[in-house]
Image (cartoon, rainbow, N blue to C red):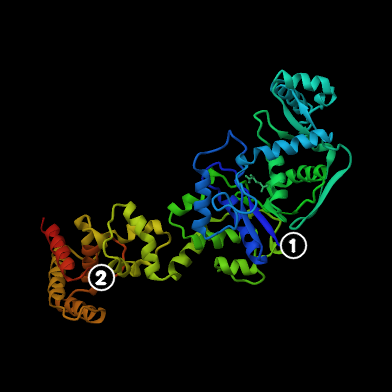
Amino acid sequence: MSEVRVRFAPSPTGDPHVGNIRTALFNYLYARHTGGKFIVRIEDTDQVRLKEGSDQAIFDSLRWLGISWDEGPDIGGPHAPYRQSERLELYQKHALELVEKGMAYYCFCSSERLENMRQIQEAAKKAPMYDRKCLSLTPEEIQAKLDAKEPYVIRLKVPREGNTEFVDLIRGKVSFENSVVDDQVLIKSDGFPTYHLACIVDDHYMEITHVIRAEEWISSTPKHIMLYNAFGWQPPKFAHAPMVLAPDRSKLSKRHGATGVKQFKELGYLPEALVNFLAFLGWAPQDEREIFSLEDLAKEFELERVNKAGAIFDMNKLDWYNGYYIRHISTENLAQRVVPFLEKAGIEVSDQEYLVECTALVQERMKTLAEAPELLDFFFTEPNYDKELLIPRKSDVETTKKALIKCREVVEALEAWEHDPLEKALRNAAEELGIKSGQLLWPLRAALTGKSASPGAFEVTLVLGKNEVLKRLDLALDKLSK
Ligand code: GLU
């Protein structure tokens, strides 16, 4: 068998949607699984929908997720260029070849005429179809119109009889009646090819063996097969992966919340978590395992195990994966990853080792990297809080003051800066004062963190260090005296 060659062919229309990236991931995994090649091709022939900077956003998203490619616009390859806008002549040439063979034709119909026709067909509940008016133009009429520079498109002369069939690697046999397929536009009036023409010319010349894409493209496939037939080329194999759906089973879109890869990055999701989660949107391994690195996925991924049914994008599941990976990467690694989030929140980190110590205390409870500033800020800046926070529910100002003064003494006198001696000394102190340990530990923790929820008093004390702890206790005592 020849080498597997698959491609991800995004249109550069902004921050890539997770549904598209799931398609990229399936292609990547299939290529790595089979030892084949993964190609990135930019399909930028729809000039109206282009968004500046999207190419870069696509590359950045893939790289961030660890998805690498073997050929592409930025790295070149044997079939360069990999950007359709740089291949326009090729499409022109092939469209004209079909015109010469009588398999495609010029159409000079105005957009008003086409629109009119569409409305009439719609009112009659018929599928919109071009009525082939221009198919009856004589060669002389065509030449005259071309000479007069009348705007035109080139259409494929779709066979109206019979069916177009193919075996989808995920869906099995798929059949479309040719009579419902419109005469596809191949070259638009701006001279650019349509998606259909460009896609199949490129898939052919780039020697793509398997087209793996989302189900929404399945109705394009008969048109593509007709084009392959018209050129006398062998079509690739097709695999249409299930759509990525919102929990209400509608197509996942912006109104459901974050859908762009960059958004998930900014929300503090780990690429490992997103990849693992995306792989399970429509695919499942043979066993019950849920945790897979990219390499493990590549080992396991088979098209036979991709489902037909739509895949629900369940944010709770993504959160679960994210929490899992946050807890399972090393604290050093996590500390590095939270830095940009802290910096964005105006927290300067100058001592990475100190950050690691702080991070260790919140690693268990952090659900996204974006929570880092909220969880860690008090380690870097003096806390800001109301004095009421210092006073436990079953205590009062005077008891709290006494407790904090005692804490100060204990901390000042503590020699071994370690957990057990600190805990013992603080618990003894509470006993000496005749108060419950909570009446002492709560104010201490609140004074250090300024929060009602945080890591425990002992851990925070040890990480902040003697000077800082004394300073914050003084601040708390000050607040209570006012
Ligand atoms: N350019 C199409 C897209 O935006 C490619 C579809 C296909 O894979 O054929 O997804």
On the question of residue 173 being in view, the answer is yes
Q: Residue 39 appears at what percent x and percent y?
A: 62, 54
Is the residue 295 above or below the residue 418 in the image? Answer: above
Residue 100 in percent (x, y) is at 81, 33
Residue under the image location 16 percent in, 65 percent down: 473
Point out residue 116 in the picture as x, y percentages from the top left corner. 73, 22
Which corner quadrant of the image does residue 350 belong to? bottom left
- Quarter-of-image position of residue 317: bottom right
Residue tagged 2: 463
Amino acid type of the residue that numbered disc 2 sits on in the rendered structure: Val
Chain-order first, disc 1 or disc 2:
1
Q: Nearer the viewer, residue 164 or 207?
A: 207
Residue kind at label 1, given as amino acid type: Ser
The circle on residue 2 is 1
- What residue do we see at 71% from left, 62% from top? 3
Horizontally, residue 97 falls left or right of residue 315, namely: right
- Residue 376 higher or lower than 220, as above or below: below
Given this view, does label 1 or label 2 mark the residue nearer the observer?
Answer: 1
* Helix, strand or loop for disc 2: helix
